[in-house]
Image (tube, grey):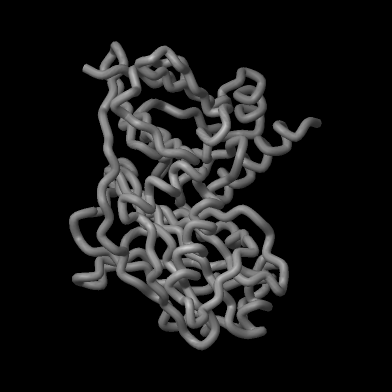
Amino acid sequence: MNDKMLDIIGLADEKYLHEAEGKPVMKQTKHRRKFSAKVIAIAAAAAVMTVTAGAVAVAKLSNKESVGEFYDSSAVSKMESRGMLSDKVFENEHFRFNLQSVIKDDYVCSCIIAVEPLDEKAQDYLGRNGFDADVVYADTGEVLPPNVLSSCGWKEYKKGDKAVNIEFDITYRYGNSKVNSSRPLKLKFKPFESDLNGKDEKEIHLLDGIAFDVPEAEKLNDVKLYSDDGKELYLSEVGFTALVPIPYPKTAEEFEKQVKNGEFEWDFEIKFKDGTVKTGRDFNMDAGGIGLMLDNTDVGFRQAFRTMIDIDKVESVKFKNIVFKRK
């Protein structure tokens, strides 16, 4: 059995976990996986996060390094020049949360956070568990449905690593479930109630008081593209959302059949006006995707990039053998 088949089987396991929880389904892609914060612990990366007399310089260096774990160098440079990087810090006695960047379009707001353990209890926690968070409207305290938040990381945490780099995505639209992006949002962090071994988490207090208001961010440039039969694709500088059906297996037999038929192939093509064509398999284009399913209603697919594209230079996008163009 090859690695791709193992990846797809992993996707199916996640899918059934999500169905049991009533969460949206996260898709498997070539470069990384994006998971619901309810399903898997946050992966980690050893990024150095220190506070010294040169704190300002260190913050600028560290946020570029942390954001560079998720985006290529050209994207990081663009984010820096457009004021999308951040050096805000939120902490308690156990953890220091360093907000590294905030970017958003009409479908998602992405916050990259470097989480630094400040004591041995925090390090032990990261070795066995991950984070959950509530998204709330900051003006009223109303808690939003858990399906609007997903998170991703890259590497397994090892004790002694200085920081954990995490990307939290607040998805504004899931079918009829919509977040009012014009209202102020807050992220309130909390531990998982059980660890990776299924044991009850005893150090449930370690993230007490860790919360922050999501800063205002410049909205990315975007455009709507359409297929010949009127299907819609929303394209921004860092990804697209295609409102097209995505198959989900309801049984193991149906799943196996869909694999054989290639229905789990979600590659895409972007054709630029100069004739250049890039695909999801090209370097720095494919950053993972998420199936927008809610309450067993298939409402489309969102694909992220690891780079920033100039949408004014895009002629068309091809996804699931459907070509989307400007009107």
- 245 vs 149: above or below: above
The picture places residue 247, in percent across and down from the top left corner, at: 50, 28
Residue displayed at 68% across by 65% down: 157
In this rendering, position of residue 36 left or right of residue 255: left
In this rendering, position of residue 161 left or right of residue 17: right
Location of the N terminus (image quadrant): top right
75 or 161: nearer the viewer: 75
The picture places residue 163, in percent across and down from the top left corner, at: 59, 69
Direction right: furthest residue: 1
- 285 vs 100: above or below: above
Quadrant of residue 217 within the rendered picture:
bottom left
- 301 vs 158: above or below: above
Q: So how many labels did they put on this image?
A: 0
Q: Is residue 69 visible?
A: yes
Q: Is residue 36 visible?
A: no
In this rendering, position of residue 141 left or right of residue 237: left
Quadrant of residue 244 within the rendered picture:
top left
Direction bottom: furthest residue: 93
The picture places residue 276, in percent across and down from the top left corner, at: 45, 16
Residue displayed at 27% across by 38% down: 221
In this rendering, position of residue 171 left or right of residue 287: left
Residue displayed at 70% across by 32% down: 4
The picture places residue 130, in percent across and down from the top left corner, at: 58, 67
- 220 vs 142: above or below: above
Residue displayed at 19% across by 60% down: 183
Location of the C terminus (image quadrant): top left
